């Protein structure tokens, strides 16, 4: 659907080659047997919420198990565990989230370092959770695991959380940030990973939905997890202002993203009274979308206008909705760590004006920001073009090099 330039193709080829080579070094790949296929999170007791919920601090590991990571249903030669841990949702209520911890088979020569990699979870069902997709190897976008592989090859431990939580509160900033930060706490505390607690050099990375999760965690870290310290954050294709994005994509080929985000935010903020805001057609559409991942609702709801689903002239002008949107615009908190942003000038899903504004606000607050505005490509291809710079930035920060700044 989109043209990929030569540099993007070369980068993708390098990442793919690294991924394939790494996957065949140690084990002869065997297809997953039906008996080994993991249970869906809806039916897997490991994902169940504790009842009663134990009185423990956020980030406490509640359960764990070793798992096999697969790509295209073939096992990848790495050590991996799933950990269930305590977190808190948008309202601060206790929930149990799940994260996957990955490590290279050969430990690093020096100190273990941790990268929290946020996938573009982008879904409204636990079927979309990265912990499940990583075990099946069938639904996680290939470039996500391909970007984790260079981190593992560098000797880093990787943790990737199901940061939307058990209710899949997609695009809800606080819930997402809590899931990421408590996943890092859990990884640092998980004894089999042999990390050095909060003294572990730690960085964050994510693109698109993963950038939303990474940067919200960066903003909330000083208040929610002050004991954590991050060497740096790399975030690309940043959804800095969901209201701005919604107005841009409503009724177009990406309108399903707007509808899906509305479902996710309504779960986090019940003051968005869907019972009165939606008409019969809207209620049916939201119920259907609420069971889907982005690859489904982005197609099924393409070219739909929100006005056809609601009982008001403009959903984004409803006071309760305006308040929720304003609370979920990035820039309301000073990030705790230096950041590398990479953003396509012509990104059609996460437009650049809100990102420019966000970078300016961070710079004004004294945060060290390295900003790479990429002049060629759209949302998907920029993910590939920007990956080498993001990986280099994180490796430099984890090596202790001073953070650069474009401010």
Image (cartoon, helix red, strand yellow):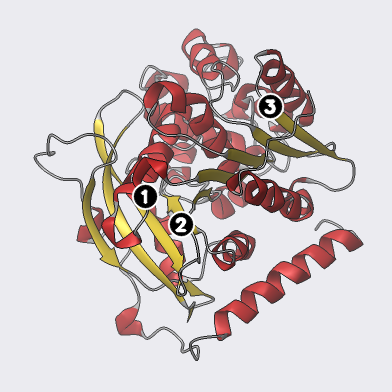
Q: Quadrant of residue 214?
A: top right
Residue marked by disc 3 = 368
Q: Image height check: is 140 above or below 227?
A: below
Left or right, 344 with reference to 288: right
Q: CA distance from mark 3 to mark 2?
A: 25 Å
Q: Residue 34's spot in the image, x, y percent? A: 35, 83
Question: Of marks 3 and 2, which one's residue comes earlier in the chain?
Answer: 2
Q: Nearer the viewer, residue 48 or 181?
A: 181
Instruction: Look at discs 3 and 2 and give the one toward the viewer.
Output: 2
Q: How far from the left and from the top, in percent, is residue 75?
A: 46, 79
In this view, the residue farthest toward the top is 319
Q: Quadrant of the C terminus?
A: top right
**What's the mark number on residue 112?**
2
Q: Is 236 left or right of 295, judged from the image as shown?
A: right
- Identify the secondary structure beneath mark 1: loop
Q: Secondary structure at mark 2?
A: loop
Task: State whether residue 60 is above or below residue 217.
Answer: below
Q: Which disc number belongs to residue 196?
A: 1
* Residue drawn 48% across the image and 29% down it: 173
């Amino acid at each position: 659907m989109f043209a990929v330039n030569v540099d993007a193709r070369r980068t993708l080829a390098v990442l793919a080659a690294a991924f394939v080579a790494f996957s065949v070094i140690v084990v002869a790949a065997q297809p997953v047997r039906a008996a080994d296929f993991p249970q869906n999170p809806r039916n897997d007791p490991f994902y169940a919420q504790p009842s009663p919920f134990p009185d423990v601090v956020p980030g406490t590991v509640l359960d764990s198990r070793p798992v096999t990571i697969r790509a295209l249903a073939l096992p990848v030669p790495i050590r991996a565990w799933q950990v269930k841990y305590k977190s808190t949702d948008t309202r601060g209520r206790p929930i149990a989230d799940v994260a996957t911890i990955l490590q290279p088979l050969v430990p690093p020569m020096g100190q273990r370092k941790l990268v929290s990699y946020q996938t573009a979870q982008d879904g409204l069902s636990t079927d979309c959770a990265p912990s499940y997709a990583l075990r099946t190897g069938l639904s996680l976008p290939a470039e996500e695991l391909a970007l984790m592989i260079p981190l593992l090859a560098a000797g880093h431990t990787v943790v990737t959380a199901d940061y939307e939580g058990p209710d899949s509160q997609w695009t809800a900033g606080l819930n997402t940030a809590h899931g990421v930060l408590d996943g890092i706490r859990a990884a640092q505390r998980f004894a089999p990973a042999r990390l050095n607690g909060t003294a572990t050099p730690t960085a964050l990375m994510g693109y698109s939905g993963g950038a939303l999760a990474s940067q919200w965690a960066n903003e909330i870290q000083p208040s929610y997890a002050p004991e954590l310290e991050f060497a740096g954050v790399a975030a690309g294709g940043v959804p800095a202002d969901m209201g701005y994005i919604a107005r841009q994509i409503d009724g177009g080929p990406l309108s399903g993203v707007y509808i899906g985000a509305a479902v996710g935010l309504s779960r986090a903020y019940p003051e968005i009274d869907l019972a009165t805001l939606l008409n019969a057609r809207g209620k049916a559409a939201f119920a259907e979308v609420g069971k889907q991942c982005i690859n489904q609702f982005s197609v099924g709801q393409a070219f739909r206008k929100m006005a056809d689903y609601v009982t008001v002239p403009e959903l984004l002008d409803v006071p309760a909705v305006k308040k929720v949107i304003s609370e979920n615009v990035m820039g309301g908190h000073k990030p705790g760590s230096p950041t590398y942003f990479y953003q396509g000038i012509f990104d059609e899903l996460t437009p650049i004006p809100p990102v420019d504004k966000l970078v300016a606000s961070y710079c004004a607050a004294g945060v060290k920001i390295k900003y790479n505005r990429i002049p060629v490509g759209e949302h998907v291809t920029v993910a590939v073009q920007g990956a080498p710079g993001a990986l280099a930035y994180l490796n430099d920060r984890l090596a202790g090099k001073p953070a650069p700044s474009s401010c």
